[in-house]
Image (tube, helix red, strand yellow):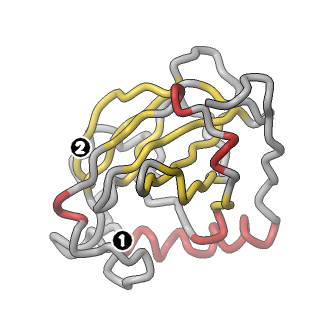
Amino acid sequence: MTDSNKSIKIPKLTRFHQLLDKALEPVMVVLGGFDGDSLQETHVWHTIRMDPSLIDLDLTVEVPGSVSARDYKNRFDPRFHIPAIDGWGWNDYVVLAPKLENLEPWHIGWHKVRDNELFLCKLHLKPVEDYALKLLKGPNNSSFFAFTSGGSQIPLKFLDEGRHGDKKYSKLRLF
């Protein structure tokens, strides 16, 4: 458990990376199969590693891994995010939201546990201004956490789950 007075500094995406995101949007629409569901918004430049000791585990949400994602453990596999071809990539998602209402923009993060120790901890740099966010489920269990843009950790809650293309939450962003 972390000291609740700890806060972190969250860097902003560079202008170059913002432009790269815009340039890749049409590609992501094609890879998403033109289905009008949320575009996947996570690329390697969107995340930073974090010190796991800064995470209060009491404020996280644990999500079981997706059986359908087990064939795509390598995020650099070109089939990783191509739902246009049925059955490819990670397609199952969860919907998470901060427990607090009327919140400033927030950032999602995730960590993995190995031998009861946090060993991989990443924070997404793109701020979320919506009440909730869709997150792809990988092949293994993950825990998610959130920080305000000001750098304070906030509690998360589980809302729902689904599969890419179901259009249940097409207005929510997908990370």
**Kind of residue indicated by mark 1:** His
Classify 165 as above or below 79. Answer: above
SS for dot 1: loop
- Which residue does the numbered mark 1 point to in the structure image? 81
Which residue does the image show at 64% across and 62% down from the upper left?
46
Is the residue under label 1 in contact with that under label 2 (CB below 8 Å)? no
Classify 126 as above or below 4. Answer: below
Q: Residue 134 is drawn in which quadrant?
A: top left
Which residue does the image show at 44% across and 81% down from the upper left?
76
Which residue does the image show at 23% across and 50% down from the upper left?
163
How packed is label 2: few (under 14 Cα within 10 Å), some, or many (20 or more)? some
Does residue 42 appear to the left or right of 47 in the view shown? left
SS for dot 2: strand
Which residue does the image show at 17% across and 59% down from the upper left?
67
- The picture places residue 175, in percent across and down from the top left corner, at 48, 53
Q: Residue furthest front?
A: 115
- The picture places residue 77, in percent across and down from the top left corner, at 37, 83
Residues at marks 2 and 1, CA–CA distance in whole angstroms: 16 Å
Seen from the viewer's position, the closer of residues 20 and 144 is 144
**Kind of residue indicated by mark 2:** Gly
- The picture places residue 70, in percent across and down from the top left corner, at 22, 68
- Which residue does the numbered mark 2 point to in the structure image? 162
